[in-house]
Amino acid sequence: MTDFSDTRQMAITAAVVAEEKKGKDVVIIDFSGKSVLYDYVIITSAMSKTETRAIANAIDMQFKNVETHRRVIQGLDSGFWILLDYGSIVIHVFAEQDRDFAGRGLRPVNRDRVDANYRLFYDLEELGKDVPRLEYAELGETKKIREEYLNRSAEIG
């Protein structure tokens, strides 16, 4: 079982869950020892508001039965930008689409229209550009965390 008293393990778990729920461009910014507010910031995107909600809910379920202290979840209703704050880790989940005003449904964001994409507009990665990224994909513990998550997901159904 993953040790959620270790904020690094929490961050990796959140990133793994985001990836498994179709999160795109998952980044872990390692602020440990550099910030009094949090140790890790996880940023990801999804192609729809439904997917952003699924990612946020799956991450929250991972931490539901452990000794984490969820401070807040914001943006779940709109699904455009969801913030999950667990104190030592903060997770941002962005939708990469906007609504077509003609009522034709959702369409991919035009990358030239920054205002249509919260992740590009706020560019949180740039705020932490001098802070190292945690290259979690290659870590041995990431494989174990992914296997545990997939096993738990299979048990739940």
Image (cartoon, rainbow, N blue to C red):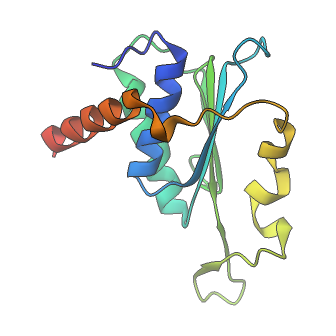
Q: Count the marks: how many?
A: 0
Q: In the figure, residue 129 lies in which quadrant?
A: top right
Residue 101 visible (yes or no): yes
Image-based side of 11 in relation to 134, left or right: left
Residue 92 vertical position relative to residue 50 in the rendered view, above or below: above
Q: In the figure, residue 80 lies in which quadrant?
A: bottom right
Residue lying at 67% horizontally and 19% vertically, measured from the top left: 39
Counting from the top left corner in percent of width and height, residue 40 is at 65, 25
Between 101 and 128, the residue placed more toward the observer is 128
Counting from the top left corner in percent of width and height, residue 136 is at 51, 35
Counting from the top left corner in percent of width and height, residue 50 is at 48, 61
Could you tell me which quadrant the N terminus lies in? top left
Residue 69 visible (yes or no): no
Image-based side of 108 in relation to 143, left or right: right
Between 120 and 8, the residue placed more toward the observer is 8
Residue 81 vertical position relative to residue 40 in the rendered view, above or below: below
Between 101 and 83, the residue placed more toward the observer is 83
Residue lying at 53% horizontally and 28% vertically, measured from the top left: 11
Residue lying at 85% horizontally and 33% vertically, measured from the top left: 130
Image-based side of 120 in relation to 5, left or right: right
Residue 118 vertical position relative to residue 114 in the rendered view, above or below: above
Residue 101 vertical position relative to residue 73 in the rendered view, above or below: below
Counting from the top left corner in percent of width and height, residue 7 is at 54, 16
Residue lying at 82% horizontally and 50% vertically, measured from the top left: 123
